Amino acid sequence: MAKRVLLVNKFYYARGGDCVVALNTETLLRENGVEAQVFAMEYPQNLPAHYQDQFASRVNFGGGLRNQWQALQRTLGKGDVRDRFEAVLDDFKPDVVHLHNIHSYLSPVVGELAHKRGIRVVWTLHDYKLLCPRYDCLLGGKPCEKCFKGAKFNVVAHKCMKESLPASGVAWLEAKKWNRRRLERNTDVFVCPSEFMASKMIAGGFDPAKVKVLNNFLDPVKLKQYQELDSGAPREDYYCFVGRLSPEKGIEDLLEVASRLPYPLKVAGSGTLEPAMRIKYADCSNIEFLGILDAPDVADLLAHARFSIMPSQCYDNNPLSVVESLCAGTPVAGSQIGGIPELIDSSNGIVFQPFDRETLSTAITMAMSRDWDHAAIARQALQRFNPETHLQALVSDIYSF
């Protein structure tokens, strides 16, 4: 009889990186003989699902007091999420419940309910929510670990959530309710996509025996795209940034440095800083804003670049843009922060200090002038981030089938 895995994520469509990983995992499991089903929150953009009529009702953190009260109840694990999730457990009878991004819109109560039935609970972490109530470990634009050792009231003291005292208060209540001991008691394995995140979980008091590292993987469609690229073909004289145009990604430092260098930079993506940056650098001939590109265009952009750049100033975990760049045979100049340095060595890129424009400028110049073995970079990355490699580790080491 085939093993059964219930994947749990707050949304069931490609809304963000967490959703993409959950969707890709579902496909990977099904294609390899595992029965996989999904539990999520009701949402108009959700894909069709077998248990969609049992999805938790939609909550909205905006709007009037009634909406906010319902959202607060959900955050604390109350409301219909309990009954609906238990109905799915009754019918599907999973061997493993695999949690992804569940805070607020679903809540960790789902893991607790599964654990009480003796079901193995696995939790892939996509951010630092279990350590930082704000989830991204940022305070004033700089990395912050004030809440790691249990002092979660810092989120209120610094109004970390949207600079709002009520929103920060809700985040504090959530952290108090779903504290480390409770989460650890109800979870068999915390899956960290980077060694860096694993080290922070352990530093925050989580049991090292329950923390395992498993990189994300490239979904089969994208993998095929990158396998078919001619990664060894001559490169054009530009470098590129692919990602969100927001402060924590270091885009302001990158554009300021790029404007003073002679090398063309192509910027793909959107975000809060895009309008202002387009205006500020409108007359800069060596910076080109491409907006949001679809997957084939991203692959094409990376495949022709001399290198890509990831100037993050936050604890990036296992950034897909770095993974895709390497799979295209394109080296990466990346900040020495979070999980980025784990993806880069002397053969496939250069690391530099975040928040330091001088070392950023030096890294760009070095990466542009170096003769890279693009074909070898692609070969190594396509093996490392292959779905089959991921599946073998997931099934044997994480699910313990």
Image (tube, rainbow, N blue to C red):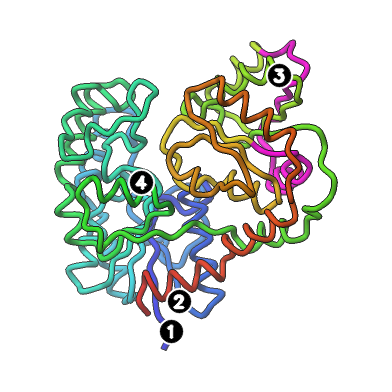
Specify the farthest residue to the right.
234
The answer to whether mark 3 and mark 4 are in CB contact below 8 A is no
Name the front one of labels 3 and 2. Answer: 3
First in sequence, mark 1 or 4: give its number. 1
| Whether residue 28 is visible | yes
Give the magenta range: 281-308
Give the CA distance from mark 3 to mark 4. Answer: 49 Å
Coordinates of residue 71 in the picture (x, y in percent): 27, 39
Question: Along the line of sight, which residue is nearer the eye, 216 or 381?
Answer: 381
Q: Residue 289 appears at what percent x and percent y?
A: 70, 25
The image shows residue 235 at horizontal and vertical percentages of 81, 42
At mark 2, the secondary structure is strand
Q: Which residue is mark 2?
A: 35
* Residue 285 counted in the magenta span: yes
Residue, disc 4 = 58
Tell me where residue 172 sits by quadrant.
top left
Q: Tags 1 and 2 in contact by the CB under 8 Å rule?
A: yes
Upstream in the sequence, badge 3 or badge 1? 1
Residue 102, above or below 352? below
Type of residue at label 2?
A: Glu
In the rendered structure, the answer to whether residue 1 lies left or right of residue 261 reads left
Q: CA distance from mark 1 to mark 4?
A: 32 Å
The residue to which callout 3 is attached is 261
**Amino acid at circle 3:** Leu
> Between marks 3 and 2, how big is the CA–CA gap?
53 Å
Mark 3 or mark 4, which is nearer to you?
A: 3
